[in-house]
Amino acid sequence: HHHAKMSKITRETYEEIIRNVLALSKEKKRNFTETIELQVMLKNYDPQKDKRFSGTVKLPHIPRPRLKVCLLGDASHIDEAKTINLPHHDVEFLKKFNKDKKLI
């Protein structure tokens, strides 16, 4: 795997980058929905141990209306997934999947 070098960028920098991307997308129309991915890392924050942030945020735009989601989780998550008819697999499936990648 090749990992891109992560670096800190200022708000001005990413706003400028997004303006450029939007301007270019108007110049050269594509036949698909273009998306921008932004990965955020919080310094000195371990989501496993630190519970300062919890809750859900509903985004104003649906990124991909036909996006398919499959939950991978333990028994309690699987039960939740079943109640809302969300496709799901448990840890046992993952163990089998690691041995045989053709399962999906």
Image (cartoon, rainbow, N blue to C red):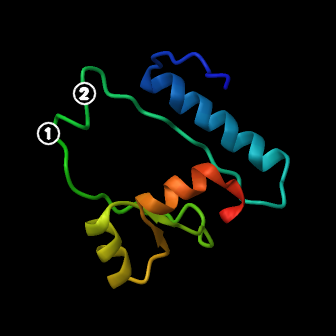
What kind of residue is marked 1? Arg
Percent across and percent down for residue 48 are 24, 37
Q: How far across and down, in percent of the image, does residue 81 sit? A: 37, 75
Front residue (pair 78, 31) = 78
Callout 1: helix, strand or loop? loop
The residue wearing badge 2 is 45
Left or right, residue 103 beside residue 74: right
Residue 53, x across and y down, in percent: 19, 43
Residue 18: assigned label: none
Q: In this view, does 85 lie above or below 3?
A: below
Label 2 or label 1, whichever comes before in sequence order:
2
Q: Is residue 50 left or right of residue 2?
A: left
Residue 66 shows in this picture: yes
Q: In which quarter of the image is the N terminus?
A: top right
Q: Where is residue 24 in the image (x, y as percent from the top left)?
A: 76, 40
Q: How crowded is mark 1: few (under 14 residues within 10 Å), some or many (20 or more)?
A: few
Cα distance, mark 2 to mark 1?
A: 9 Å
Residue 104 at least partly seen = no
Amino acid type, label 2: Tyr
Task: Give the residue pinned by disc 1.
Answer: 52
Quarter assignment of residue 59 = bottom left
